[in-house]
Amino acid sequence: MKFLMKARLELSGEIKDRAAVERHIEGAREALKKGVPKGEQGGEIKSVEIGKDKVTLILESGRHVRPHDAILRIKKRLSQALGREQGIGVRGVAVESYEAWYPLDQVPAGKITLPFVKEIEIVGKTAHIVFDELDETALENRYPDRILKRLEEKIKEERVSGKAEFSKRHSESEPRLNRYRLREDPTTELAKRNWVKHMGRGVWTILPSYAALWRAIEDTVMERVARPLGFVEVMLPKIVPLDVQKKKGQLFGNPNEMW
């Protein structure tokens, strides 16, 4: 198992002390080895390129401290150190390239596609995966690990099969969808029928006819479905602090609302 990433840390200002950045990167090298079992490969910084307002790194790992975790650890370390010493921070992480060589228990029978993956090549029992369009949020949510898990699931699903479904049709009514399909803008149609009225930007009032239909549907669901099944009604109010309502200018209520 092998992971290889090239990523860029975008800084909020120009680096004033290059030697200090190099020192913190060296400290990160040791930090990435913590917790890795003896004899196993942890996260490694293979190369560093320090620019005027960015730091580009190539990271490699085995199973432990994978690059998508390592780059976030390095970002946090540099953000704290550079903010304290040079008054600059790390704006974000940009992934330039990310690849993985992942061992498989079983070889897929056909072509497999996965989100955030540009290319998958199966060589023997190893999948070479080229990730694509991974932003910082994707790294924080550990998308690469999820993608690898989904790859394993898809391969297993290929080998799961059951009995073919059997069905026999006795009769069939004529298609009725066209008879009831609404071809006009429903809002315009409701306004024409005087079922709704536009009261302002994004605000519509439901008028008596539509309100009666609404209540009839609601009553039908309650009387014929919910109550026979043993459901009882609960209320989940949303409590808004008075200072929030005051800031919104709604302390004394909104039009057409009851307090």
Image (tube, helix red, strand yellow):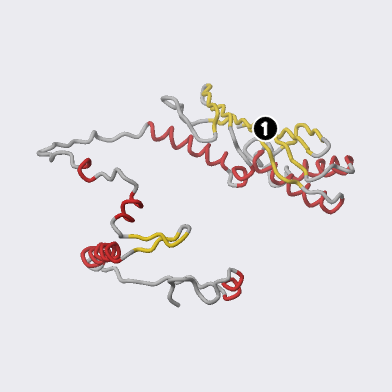
Give the camera-side residue of 90 and 152.
90
Query: Would residue 256 appear left or right of 11 to someone viewing this image?
Result: left
Q: Residue at x 44, y 61 (%)?
A: 203
Residue extending furthest left?
170
Amino acid type shown at disc 1: Glu
State the residue position of label 1.
Answer: 96
Q: Secondary structure at mark 1?
A: strand
Residue 195, quarter of picture? bottom left
Vertical order, 217 against 47 (above or below): below
How many numbered marks appear? 1
Vertical order, 26 against 102 (above or below): below
Where residue 193 sits in the image (x, y, percent)?
Answer: 28, 56
Q: Residue at x 56, y 27 (%)?
A: 128
Vertical order, 10 against 99 (above or below): below
Q: Residue at x 22, y 40 (%)?
A: 178
Q: Residue at x 22, y 42 (%)?
A: 177
Where residue 224 sits in the image (x, y, percent)?
Answer: 21, 64
